[in-house]
Image (spheres, rainbow, N blue to C red):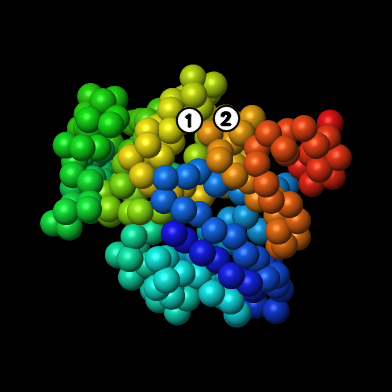
Amino acid sequence: MLKVTDICSSYGEAKVLDRVSMQVAEGEIVALLGRNGMGKTSLVRSIMGLGSPRVTAGSVKLNDQELVGLRSFEIANKGIGYVPQGRRLFQSLTVLEHLQMLARKDPEAWTVRRVFDAFPRLEERKYHRGNQLSGGERQMLAIGRALMTGPRIVLMDEPTEGLAPVAVENVESILGTLRREGLGILLVEQNLYSAMAVADRVYILETGRVVWEGLPATLMADQNVLHQYLGIH
């Protein structure tokens, strides 16, 4: 289980997270919602130890092992995968090269063959470079790349951003498959209805604080919360 307790983070003097607490268990999808600029990406970056924003207080533990203070590659080695917003692929590398560069001997890690079995479209495009892929294909590759590190928890930052509806449905299907395989997923998402289609639990951030947590059905039935924190009428 990933357990975040009273995390505070700052960009210089500007505090962006204020005592945020949440948890994600293996085998569940937790959606992190909120308007733009409310701290969602900052929380994911803080968990991943990317250095900006800087964690100033609190704890992040994976199966009771403290992650705060570790470097990002050390956190990845502990079992946290990361799918960044915007995919961040290497434009000049092929699909196959993206995956091969992360191949590991760890028995928990995914192999290239396993990624291709999960994403047949990537195998069809394995010799295409990053700049030759569609948005949906780039997102599959970003997810596949994260799985190559053998994570137990995957942080996904806006995985459906900019995708056509059919590609969004494909991502939702992929998330369901990963959950059935026992992975825990922290899903940062602006697409409320896509998030609600897959999430087991929900947190809402407002100005760097958790202001609501609960079940998707409870959220969708509460028009006041939807309007106040997400701008949904």
Residue 152 screen position, x and y as percent: 35, 54
Q: Is residue 225 visible?
A: yes
Mark earlier in primary sequence (1, 2): 1
Q: Residue furthest left?
A: 105
Q: Residue at x 59, y 60 (%)?
A: 22
Residue drawn at x 73%, y 33% as measured from the top left: 220
Is residue 206 in view?
Answer: no
The residue most toward the top is: 166
> Which residue is located at x 42 percent, y 71 percent?
64
Horizontally, residue 54 falls left or right of residue 149, namely right
Circles 1 and 2 in contact, beta carbons < 8 Å: yes
Secondary structure of the residue carrying numbered label 1: helix
CA–CA distance between discs 1 and 2? 8 Å
Provide the residue designation for mark 1.
172
Q: Position of residue 198 (x, y in %)?
A: 53, 34
Look at the numbered disc 2 and give the secondary structure of its residue. helix
Q: Nearer the viewer, mark 1 or mark 2?
A: 2
In the rendered image, residue 193, in percent from the top left (x then y), is placed at: 64, 30
Give the quarter of the figure containing the C terminus: top right
Q: Amino acid at mark 1?
A: Glu
Q: Quadrant of residue 129?
A: top left
Quadrant where the N terminus lies? bottom left
Q: Which residue is mark 2?
A: 197
Count up the numbered dots: 2
Q: Quadrant of residue 121?
A: top left
Q: What amino acid type is highlighted by mark number 2?
A: Ala
Where residue 157 sits in the image (x, y, percent)? 52, 48
Residue 70 in the figure: left or right of residue 111: right
